[in-house]
Image (cartoon, coloured by chain):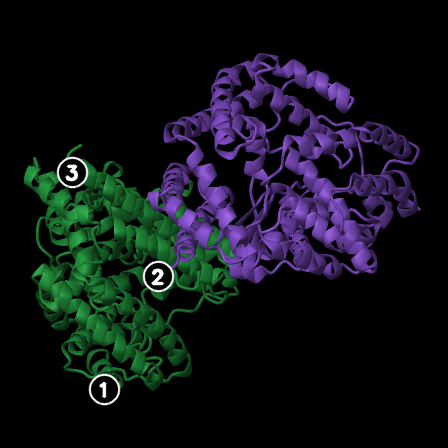
Chain colours: A green, B purple
Amino acid sequence: MTALDRLTTRFRRIAILDEAVGMLHWDAAAVMPAGGAAARSEQLATLRELSHATLTAPETADELAAAAAAAADPDQRARIALMHRRWQRATALPPDLVTAASRARSHCEAAWRSARAADDFAAVRPAFESLLSLVREEAAALAQALGRSPYDALLDGYEPGLTAADCNHLFDRLLAFLPDLLGRALEVQASRPAPQPLPGPFPVARQAELARRFMAALGFDFAHGRLDTSAHPFCGGTPDDVRITTRYDEDDCLKALMGVLHETGHALYERGLPPLLRHQPAGEARGMAVHESQSLIVEMQACRTPEFAAWMAPRLRTAFGGEGAAWATGNIHRLVTRVSRGLIRVDADEIAYPLHVILRFRLEQALLAGDLAPADLPAAWGDGMADLVGVRPGDDRDGCLQDIHWYDGAFGYFPTYTFGAVMAAQLFAAAEAARPDLRERLREGDFRPLTGWLAVHVHAHGALRSWDEILRNATGGPLDVARFRGHLERRYLGEAASASS
Amino acid sequence: MTALDRLTTRFRRIAILDEAVGMLHWDAAAVMPAGGAAARSEQLATLRELSHATLTAPETADELAAAAAAAADPDQRARIALMHRRWQRATALPPDLVTAASRARSHCEAAWRSARAADDFAAVRPAFESLLSLVREEAAALAQALGRSPYDALLDGYEPGLTAADCNHLFDRLLAFLPDLLGRALEVQASRPAPQPLPGPFPVARQAELARRFMAALGFDFAHGRLDTSAHPFCGGTPDDVRITTRYDEDDCLKALMGVLHETGHALYERGLPPLLRHQPAGEARGMAVHESQSLIVEMQACRTPEFAAWMAPRLRTAFGGEGAAWATGNIHRLVTRVSRGLIRVDADEIAYPLHVILRFRLEQALLAGDLAPADLPAAWGDGMADLVGVRPGDDRDGCLQDIHWYDGAFGYFPTYTFGAVMAAQLFAAAEAARPDLRERLREGDFRPLTGWLAVHVHAHGALRSWDEILRNATGGPLDVARFRGHLERRYLGEAASASS
């Protein structure tokens, strides 16, 4: 048995334990009765502890060194590097810090839930200050181990290799046109009649049935996955058993449907990961930016086109017995491409969304650097929103309390949403260039030109290529904001006119 | 940290891993898409291996010896003895034998599925012979470690302490009256008009809704459990999150309902296990005989009484819009107390059921002893059925291929069904003596006199008392066949007349 064989066995065990965690996490979110929560926490903690112990066992370091020395080719080296990265991040943190931070996360998240409900930032501030100070310690320890800046070390945890410099480069380019584009898009929108809302109610069972039809059109394989309901939609499970969830609103059928299309994009990526590298770091999804590019290329790039609206509209009419002007393709397309200066990130349209992200990118760096005290966060949030999106929240619930991320200790995550959005536009353009019939086929609910292309150019690489390499290989060039800009301008300044005619 | 503390921590980890196995097993049976099976097997195998390794670690033996030497009181000694028993059974088998037997089980079970579908015993015979020979090796190794006979060592795996002598003692007494009682019950039944079947179809959603109402009446706490659908009904999950399943027949609503009541009896036992001993061998269910007594006391003793039928009948009428004589209480009671000379154990009534078990008890001992060759099993089965139940199967599918147990290597399990049935009658009589309103309260769907008594006299003991001690403590005496006989005579020779009037 070579060192690489031993590592492969070790990481296989880790991955299988992590799969069990994934399934039990899905169960907790989708079907578990409330009274099972305490026992479930212990099951998850025990499995995570075993996974962590398997990764950080004393033998791992020697195995990694021996395997690296014996690596026969670039692919082996890449496989070992991904194992090494996992091990390095896991061993960088002193066990006491891991325990303290884990407790602080649970405590702060619980405090945040009450504080958000009561719109009372002061109530979560002490817990948040404690957590922030531990996250800074974690970032410092990771920074030292990885030879990166503390913030880059956190970013790397969500999208390997992503840096603050990458973020600044992208966000500067976005800021050069997005605020102006948002204003112009709102003007175009205001110059035309407002879309009519679809008249509900929409029974949940029919929404779910229609969602499954849409998933099937996308190629979701129900022999290897499920759709269920949870309070916070997600894509979980394992590549061989992908579990996506949504939540239904009886007054708005488009919310759940578009959400399901988004999660199906994530699901196709998981399902398309290379089976030969199953249970190895190299066979996993690369990172959250690449993951988000796959959900957004489905939801935003493909499913908010007028072509897909033409397929979707008659199916909505049939499912809900809809009649009249509200159910026309043009109206439905306008409904799924509304823009607004909203306060809430998760409800934001694709023009405003990066502005929400940029605000968080600025604030989280300031918080971590100590340049912004938690006490000053609400005011800084309000100013930032007014500056970037052009609205100011009337309370903290719609302001700095709206997202769970920071209160769960997740700093460095937000930028991946916008990298995903920009990558999605660039990948979609490349897919269209390779398959000129791509858009037209969406009129028939046929996603194969898109999903077939993604399977080869993104999914099949697993974690072996960085977000940047995936883009270069698939599109011929580095991240290109012009594609994203062109997409938004066509859709919100130009395309909308033709779709609505 | 004392040795007992270390053992407590060790067994806690084992129990939590086993809980994760339980939840993933439920998932596989109730919700998993077919394509998830291969990955799930690996998850289960890994978790079981970790659980086994934790139990059989080299330190366990020393910890057990030190803890036993330091035990302060009988309860501690009992707790340690249960840990020791678990460890002893796990370490008795050489690892190579465990691996070979596990493979042979999977192989034989798969062969049995095809063989049963094709009614072709010869097709499974080679796999069955191999498995049988490994089970004999296992029984011999366990016998040596435990100082029991090989068959007793297997029985002990399902109900600790149960012996072939116990079985012979019970079964001899049952054989003294059951065959005659079956004949007389059939005569009584034939002398009266046959019950009218309830006219279906019965929509699954309404059956499920009604089943949940019945579960709620029994005190099933839906904050700590669920009802779902699976091909083979079972009670799984964990004490804090009990998952029961059933399967629905659109033409027969009583099948699923009575099945759910049975599983709810199991669920109440699990849920009622002592929380202070959670995650310890002493806090688990005692064994399969005690478990079956809890399902049968609900299903057979309580829910097939005329009193419960009086509560059930109007609820069935309301749920399914039933009208007319078929829906009368008396007719429904007759439907749930039919007796017959049937071929299939799982469909057997409570008079014939022990005869099915006695046949298997005889045959499995003969197979293990080498006194019966697998090739001769079909003929021996036919003769035994003719002798005991008075019918002879026309094929092996309805004969020796009907049950999965042996083909999955489970020898020594069948007797627990009948111990459970006899214990249930005795426990029910004691509960009635303690709570004279018990039966009458069933007319209002009020199970609290029964379930409250069971919680104290059975559930709360966990595994600290043997099946025999539980009986003696709860009823004042040892296993008493007269209670079971009295119950059957009242219901099938006497009570039936009064209930139907």
- Which of marks 3 and 2 precedes in the sequence? 3
State the residue in front, A299 or A383.
Answer: A383
Q: Which residue is mark 2?
A: A333
Q: Which residue shows up at 74% across the image and 57% down it?
A: B450
Residue B316 pos. (x, y %): 76, 52
Q: What's the amino acid at mark 1?
A: Asp
Apparent side of residue B4 relative to residue A77 in the rendered image (left or right): right
Q: Residues within 10 Å of mark 2 (few under 14, many from 20)?
A: many
Tell me residue A313's x, y (percent).
41, 55
Q: Amino acid at mark 3?
A: Leu
Label 3 is found on which chain of the structure? A
Between the residue at mark 2 and the residue at mark 1, the CA separation in whole angstroms equals 41 Å
| Amino acid type, residue under disc 2 in the picture | His
Cα gap from disc 2 to disc 3, whole angstroms: 52 Å
Binning the other alpha carbons within 10 Å of mark 3 as few (below 14), some (14 to 19) or many (20 upward) gives many
Disc 1 marks which residue?
A: A376
User: Dots 2 and 3: beta carbons under 8 Å?
Assistant: no
Please say if B433 is above or below A188.
above
